[in-house]
């Protein structure tokens, strides 16, 4: 049977609802980042089956919980001050958060079409392989390396540093004035702790991760409740000052909005998380749209309401001066200068951001693990190895090392903002290419079944935003200053992607990484 017919037949199996169909789907599914190109120019090669199949255990509600838990991280607790400082006014700050929600929903709709059209784990790797088969595995390779070496570790480093900020807040009772290297040291300890938990205490890590996810959601609900309740009972609330001249001082420079949108999209990132684990989702054709869009919509509503709550209690200048401890200052103002606002609540905010690091370290190590088994990385005998603790300990160690490097290397002063910007740049590059690839597949692969078809506007919006996010960071801002040049983050990201093209030629073409990978050896053994 031709390979494309096998792909279509497998898709029809995945549509079924019966237990027998689910079993058949499991037998045909592959693990995340564990399969070769869907439409490779090497027509003699078949998809490589991974060493172990994944069980479909995620339903609608568990899938939605993963989306919500992955999205909610340090962003909503720390970036509002940076966004307000960039755009200049309360009204425009709120508009940027709403715009971020709208763009994310459009992107999610496009990814739902991709995920239901190509119902396999792997996310962008699968979509880029399908839409751009030549040169073989080039874009998929670039995406994997960018995710492993820039996007994931930079975001986790930012979350780790914010965790240190809030733990220092709880220890000193002050939102600012801490030693930056003390915060980074705590961030390093957080990264090492999460690595050890996932590497050695696997069951305990899963339980802790679930508990911390619950803390994140409850804390965000508390922000909304406290903000609106306090504004109703307190006469000195900041609402009149914040909203009376909402758009006064709004910036008109495009680079300000590029910087702000990177922070907003950092906060909303994670709505594609189920696209990486479709092989573990029951009836993905039905549950992927509901879980992904439902989880994103719930989170977007909470984010917008949380920002309203911040501005109801804090005046704009207080938010600007709070740095990355916006939520801590918010609770201190709401509860007064007492232990609850300055000591207790910051601990829970720190635990919430710790939960995001826990989730991220788990996911980042699996990308390294599966990419190594696929042949995208050297040393696959080590990086693709399962330890006696039933964890990818080598992959976890590499992930931890990369996170630590991103924590300690940026110069003091603007590390958090730099980490968000450098990780967001390649992310948007591959987001845009993936959605553009969806339009390519509509023309070149009309035979593929599409149970969910995104609106044209839903495809156009993320592509246009991706172009904006990739071009405008190179435009000099109005007030170019600080210890890190404005071009440092995008130039570093572009340089890495270009360097990765050379690495692709060495690993895939010269060393024949795909043919000699762990998964290929396992397939031959079977």
Image (cartoon, helix red, strand yellow):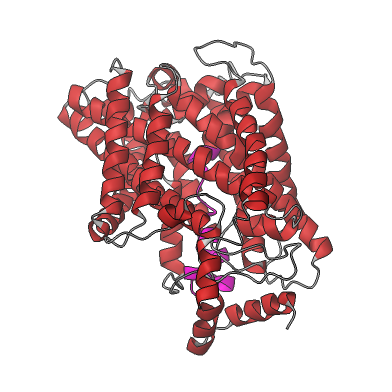
Task: Name the residue rendered at 54%, 73% in the picture.
Answer: 523
Is 119 left or right of 353, judged from the image as shown?
right
**Relative vertical location of residue 89 with respect to residue 271 in this rendering, above or below:** above
Give the position of the N terminus as an image quadrant.
bottom right
Q: Which residues are magenta?
A: 265-290
Q: Is residue 175 visible?
A: no
**Relative vertical location of residue 163 with respect to residue 294 in this rendering, above or below:** above
Q: Toward which corner of the image does residue 350 lie, by quadrant?
A: top left
**Front position in the image: 38 or 151:** 38
Task: Name the residue rendered at 26%, 47% in the picture.
Answer: 196
Q: Is residue 198 visible?
A: yes
Q: Toward which corner of the image does residue 398 lie, by quadrant?
A: top left
Q: Main secondary structure of the magenta part?
A: helix
Task: Name the residue rendered at 72%, 44% in the picture.
Answer: 463
Q: Position of residue 194 (x, y in %)?
A: 30, 45
Based on the picture, tell me whether residue 489 belongs to the magenta stretch.
no
Q: Residue furthest front?
A: 510
**Front position in the image: 152 or 80:** 152
Is 39 left or right of 425, judged from the image as shown?
right
Q: Position of residue 55 (x, y in %)?
A: 43, 74
Based on the picture, tell me whether residue 276 belongs to the magenta stretch.
yes
Is 26 left or right of 137, judged from the image as shown?
left
**Front position in the image: 505 or 475:** 505
Q: Residue furthest left?
A: 339
**Relative vertical location of residue 279 with respect to residue 295 in this rendering, above or below:** below
Task: Name the residue rendered at 76%, 54% in the picture.
Answer: 134
**Front position in the image: 91 or 420:** 420
Is 517 left or right of 217, judged from the image as shown?
right
Q: Position of residue 438 (x, y in %)?
A: 73, 57
Q: Position of residue 94 (x, y in %)?
A: 54, 33
Q: Toward which corner of the image does residue 492 lie, by quadrant?
A: top right
């Amino acid at each position: 049977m031709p390979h494309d017919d096998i792909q279509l037949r497998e898709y029809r199996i995945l549509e079924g609802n019966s237990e027998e169909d689910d079993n058949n789907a499991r037998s045909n599914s592959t693990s995340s980042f564990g399969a070769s190109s869907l439409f490779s120019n090497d027509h003699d090669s078949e998809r490589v089956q991974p060493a172990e199949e994944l069980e479909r255990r995620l339903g609608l509600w568990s899938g939605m919980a993963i989306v919500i838990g992955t999205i909610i991280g340090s962003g909503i607790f720390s970036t509002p001050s940076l966004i307000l400082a960039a755009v200049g006014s309360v009204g425009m700050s709120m508009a940027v958060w709403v715009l971020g929600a709208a763009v994310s929903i459009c992107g999610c709709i496009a990814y739902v079409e991709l995920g239901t059209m190509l119902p396999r784990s792997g996310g962008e790797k699968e979509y880029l392989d399908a839409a751009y088969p030549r040169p073989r595995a080039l874009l998929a390779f670039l995406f994997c390396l960018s995710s492993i070496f820039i996007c994931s570790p930079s975001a986790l480093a930012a979350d780790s540093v914010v965790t240190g900020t809030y733990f220092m807040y709880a220890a000193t009772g002050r939102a600012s004035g801490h030693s930056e290297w003390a915060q980074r040291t705590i961030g390093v300890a957080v990264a090492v702790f999460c690595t050890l938990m996932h590497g050695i205490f696997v069951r305990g890590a899963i339980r802790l991760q679930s508990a911390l996810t619950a803390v994140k959601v409850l804390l965000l609900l508390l922000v909304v409740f406290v903000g609106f309740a306090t504004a109703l009972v307190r006469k000195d609330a900041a609402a009149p000052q914040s909203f009376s001249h909402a758009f006064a001082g709004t910036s008109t420079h495009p680079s300000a909005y590029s910087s702000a949108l990177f922070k907003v999209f950092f906060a909303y990132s994670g709505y594609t998380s189920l696209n990486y684990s479709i092989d573990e989702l029951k009836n993905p054709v039905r549950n992927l749209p509901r879980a992904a869009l439902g989880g994103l919509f719930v989170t977007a509503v909470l984010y917008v309401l949380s920002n309203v709550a911040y501005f109801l209690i804090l005046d704009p200048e207080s938010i600007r001066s709070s740095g990355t401890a916006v939520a801590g200052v918010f609770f201190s103002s709401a509860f007064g200068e007492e232990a609850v606002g300055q000591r207790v609540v910051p601990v829970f905010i720190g635990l919430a951001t710790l939960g995001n690091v826990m989730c991220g370290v788990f996911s980042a190590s699996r990308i390294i693990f599966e990419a190594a088994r696929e042949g995208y990385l050297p040393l696959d005998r080590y990086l693709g190895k399962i330890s006696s603790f039933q964890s990818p300990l080598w992959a976890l160690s590499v992930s931890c090392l990369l996170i630590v490097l991103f924590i300690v290397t940026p110069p003091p002063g603007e590390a958090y903002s730099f980490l968000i910007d450098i990780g967001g740049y390649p992310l948007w590059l591959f987001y845009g290419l993936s959605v553009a690839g969806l339009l390519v597949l509509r023309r070149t692969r009309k035979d593929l079944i599409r149970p969910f078809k995104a609106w044209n506007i839903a495809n156009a919006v993320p592509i246009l935003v991706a172009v904006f996010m990739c071009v405008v960071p190179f435009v000099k801002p109005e007030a170019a200053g600080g210890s890190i040049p404005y071009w440092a983050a995008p130039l570093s990201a572009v340089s890495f992607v270009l360097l990765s093209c050379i690495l692709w030629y060495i690993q895939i073409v010269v060393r024949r990484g795909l043919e000699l990978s762990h998964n290929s050896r396992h397939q031959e053994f079977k």
